[in-house]
């Protein structure tokens, strides 16, 4: 947006002060130095071209004053200085003062030959160039701070986007664990059961193998749905699946529905039920399981919990974070041979 304005201002400077093509070349060099400094400042590496741009601009200003009698060529030096000085790592105030003094000193040399219009020369060659240079450099300091804040905000947004990607990957990994871990453990149990039945009850063994095939097919479908962000757990289906698995393992199941479950909480409650079912089948020697459902909570209690300290259950640990993110609370407790898993969303009651 500013580049066309700088080009137009530079063209006016050349048109005002140039008296010959040689003047156009010299003054044009100053304009080019200002434009190069601006472009590199916009790219964030103005210090790389700071020295050559400053050398050209500082040479053009005395040439304009002493050789061609022009008073507008300070434009190049003011622009280069305003882009470079605020970016210096240190001694910025000293550099700003030195540059402003240089502009004033070069303009003051014109006063040596001014006998008739001393005040006019003073204003045209000293006060205006010095004042404009000081103002441009002074304005660039708060402007630099503004751009620094904008840069920090952009970096913060980039970091937030990276964190969002990481959180999504963790969520995907957790869902994949829910699907694959649960299915593989059930397949393991059913395969072992089929092996025991194959010699004595062929039809029952075939039935178990058909269920294994159906379970694997369903898992493949769920994995595809997860990959395309279409997967949704159905609490009723998960409840029926848990009941069938427990009964197949010889575990008595009792389900108590105190109220219809809020659909908004149903998916997470279904995930808690699925993960808990897998943990019971894998870690406990349960003989009974009680499942209690309310409008916004689920509680699963089972016996056969080991007397050892509570094991690390990574699946439930990941679910605890997801439940907390939705304003709920996941409770896991082991006491007297019983294991309790409960999830509740108080704000949805």
Image (cartoon, rainbow, N blue to C red):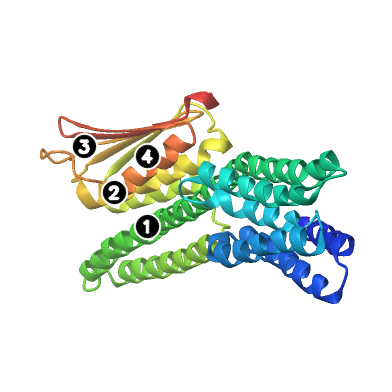
Q: Residues within 10 Å of mark 3 (few under 14, many from 20)?
A: many
Mark positioned earlier in the residue sequence (4 or 3): 3
Nearest the eye: 188 or 173: 173
Instruction: Please provide percent x and percent y for residue 310.
Output: 18, 39
Instruction: Please provide percent x and percent y for residue 307.
Output: 10, 38
Query: CB under 8 Å between callouts 2 and 1?
Result: yes
Tell me how far mark 4 sits from mark 2, CA to CA: 10 Å
Mark positioned earlier in the residue sequence (2 or 1): 1
Which mark is nearer the camera, 2 or 3? 2
Q: In the image, 225: left or right of 284?
A: right
Mark positioned earlier in the residue sequence (4 or 1): 1
Residue occupied by mark 2: 314
Mark positioned earlier in the residue sequence (4 or 2): 2
Tell me how far mark 2 sits from mark 3, CA to CA: 21 Å
Q: In the image, 54: left or right of 168?
A: right
Question: Of helix, strand and loop, which one carries label 2?
Answer: helix
Q: In the image, 239: left or right of 246?
A: right
Query: CB under 8 Å between callouts 4 and 3?
Result: no
The quarter of the picture where residue 230 lies is bottom right
Q: Residue at x 53, y 65 (%)?
A: 48
Query: How many numbered circles are shown?
Result: 4
Tell me how far mark 4 sits from mark 1, CA to CA: 15 Å
Tell me how far mark 4 sits from mark 3, CA to CA: 22 Å
- Tell me if residue 334 comes above or below residue 113 in the rendering: above
The quarter of the picture where residue 135 lies is top right
Q: In the image, 338: left or right of 252?
A: left
Residue occupied by mark 1: 177
Mark positioned earlier in the residue sequence (2 or 3): 3
Residue occupied by mark 3: 303
């Amino acid at each position: 947006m500013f580049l066309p304005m700088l080009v137009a201002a530079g063209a006016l400077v050349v048109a005002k002060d140039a008296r010959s093509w040689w003047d156009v070349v010299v003054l044009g060099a100053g304009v080019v130095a200002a434009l190069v400094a601006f472009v590199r400042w916009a790219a964030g590496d103005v210090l790389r071209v700071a020295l050559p741009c400053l050398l050209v601009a500082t040479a053009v200003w005395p040439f304009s004053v002493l050789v061609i009698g022009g008073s507008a060529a300070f434009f190049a030096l003011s622009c280069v200085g305003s882009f470079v000085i605020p970016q210096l790592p240190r001694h910025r105030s000293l550099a700003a003062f030195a540059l402003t003094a240089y502009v004033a000193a070069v303009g003051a040399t014109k006063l040596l030959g001014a006998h008739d219009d001393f005040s006019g020369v003073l204003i045209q060659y000293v006060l205006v160039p010095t004042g404009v240079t000081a103002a441009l450099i002074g304005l660039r300091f708060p402007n630099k701070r503004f751009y620094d804040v904008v840069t920090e905000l952009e970096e913060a947004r980039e970091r937030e986007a990276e964190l969002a990607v990481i959180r999504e990957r963790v969520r995907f990994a957790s869902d994949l664990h829910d699907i694959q871990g649960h299915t593989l453990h059930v397949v393991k149990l059913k395969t072992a059961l089929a092996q025991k039945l194959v010699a004595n009850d062929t039809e029952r063994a075939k039935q178990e193998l058909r269920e294994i095939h159906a379970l694997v097919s369903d898992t493949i479908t769920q994995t595809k749905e997860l990959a395309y962000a279409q997967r949704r757990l159905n609490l009723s289906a998960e409840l029926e699946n848990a009941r069938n698995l427990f009964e197949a393992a010889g575990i008595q199941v009792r389900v108590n529905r105190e109220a219809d479950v809020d659909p908004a909480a149903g998916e997470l409650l279904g995930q808690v039920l699925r993960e808990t079912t897998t943990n019971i089948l894998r870690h406990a020697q349960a003989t009974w399981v009680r499942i209690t459902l309310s409008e916004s909570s689920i509680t699963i209690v089972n016996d056969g919990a080991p007397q050892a300290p509570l094991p690390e259950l990574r699946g439930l640990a990941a679910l605890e974070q997801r439940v907390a993110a939705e304003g709920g609370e996941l409770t896991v407790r082991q006491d007297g041979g019983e294991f309790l898993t409960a999830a509740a969303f108080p704000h949805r009651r």
